[in-house]
Amino acid sequence: MQNVDTTKYVIYAEITADGIVERPDVVGAIFGQTEGLLGSDLDLRDLQKTGRIGRIDVQITSSGGKSGGTISIPSSFDKVETAILASALETIDRVGPCIAHIAVARIEDVRAAKRKYVVDRSKHILMEMFDENLLDTLEITEQIKQSVRVEEITHIGPDHLPAGPNVLDSDAILVVEGRADVLNLLKYGIKNAVAVGGTNVPPTISDLCSKKVVTAFTDGDRGGELIIKELLQIADIDYVARAPEGKCVEDLSQKAIVRALRQKIPVEQVLDQYKIKVPSKKGREVTTKRKSLIRERPVRIGRSAEIERQERQLDDRSAELDLIEREPKDPMEWFMSNLEDLNGTLSARLFDRNKTMLKEVAVRDLAKELKDSNGDVTGVVFDGVVTQRILDIAAYKSLEYLIGAKMGNIIKSPVCVKVVTRES
């Protein structure tokens, strides 16, 4: 009987006989004609009893008065002894009464077949069983970061709105659509975002917007546009930023988030775009003054070189405003008269050196008009926010003054351009 644990090789041979023979005839011929041929150490009967060779398998068929088939013998011997047993089979020349011929076809190394199985099976296990459970270093790190972000997210107000941990303490906040947006911003270290949770803006958002400088940051789809329209009607927001068209804030990369926030536009331009009625003049002035105090309040965290540089800039700007205020009242009255004329129109007036109006354009087209000007424009009065971008263009075009409704987040203020706002 074959011992499957010790088999090393399998001898395969082909047999032909000139007559009708059956399996017992072939097995008998194998044992009978090899008996004593190789000595007592390689006697097939004794080897089978001790398990050194396995069961002799014979497959034979007869046709046309002749027989043919195959023989297989498992062996636990090494290569030399197995080769001797194989060659002994070829000495058999009769099976029963018939002349027969046996030829060894091949010897199979069972261990090689097992090794091939092991290799193939290992590939299968590696590809299909480890892929779902094996985490690389980046995945482990990301899971840990995700866990921390979930722990960092808080809920504020009676509406339990998902928010970053710095929303209540920050002077400026981002209003986004959902919890996933807050989590994505937390992923990149932005901790001052709060979610409205849908198109029905809750009272908590309105209360927050009345106290802070607010940027609405929504998806680039129809839903994001609807949220902006509702926020414009019931909350006091200052800027609007949108994800690229068809994209969601929760799917944006850090680079895309930064780009979208840098391209935010003042709320006055959005109100004009959506044709939404602006708040009353009195209400806007109160809100503008209060929020300007928030933006202008210096944050003193140490006497670093950067802080000192910012303070010098504030001092320079204050000196410029003081200089303007010391000028005769007539120019200021002229500035304010034009500004009041433009109040609520979201328009801009371009003047030459003699304060003659050259043209009136929409605020959204002001940057383009200034870029295209040929040097004849020396001043602008407009019903909008004085942004860093507009101020930079004005300095580049050598404008003398820039008069706006309110001041945006100005990092650097060129001394060559006088800046006056209704709130200053």
Image (spheres, rainbow, N blue to C red):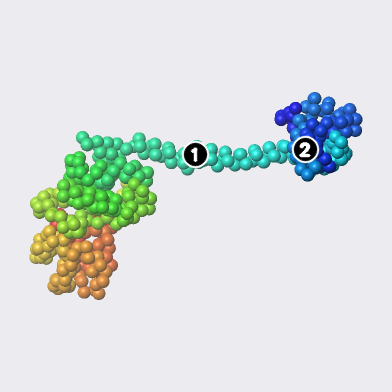
Q: Nearer the viewer, mark 1 or mark 2?
A: 2
Give x and y (percent) for residue 158.
21, 35
Viewer-nearest residue: 16 or 328: 16
Q: Is residue 54 above or below residue 193?
A: above
Identified at 30% across, 41% down, the residue is: 179
The vertical placement of 4 against 374, above or below, is: above
Residue farthest along the top direction in this orientation: 49
Give the amino acid type for the residue marked by disc 1 in the picture: Glu
Q: Which class describes the residues within 10 Å of circle 2: few (<14), some (14-19), or many (20+)?
A: many
Q: Is residue 400 left or right of residue 115?
A: left
Task: Specify the label residue 132 is tagged with.
Answer: 1
Would you say 283 lies left or right of 418 here?
left
Looking at the rendered structure, which numbered label has been put on residue 71? Answer: 2
CA–CA distance in space, label 1 to label 2: 46 Å
- Using the image, determine if residue 40 lies above or below residue 258: above
Q: Nearer the viewer, residue 123 or 50?
A: 50
Quadrant of the image for the N terminus? top right
| Disc 1: CA contacts within 10 A as few (<14), some (14-19) or many (>=20) | few
- The residue at the point 80 percent across, 25 percent down is 49
Residue at 67%, 41% (x, y): give it. 116
User: Identity of the amino acid at label 2?
Assistant: Ile
Residue drawn at x 85%, y 36% is 95
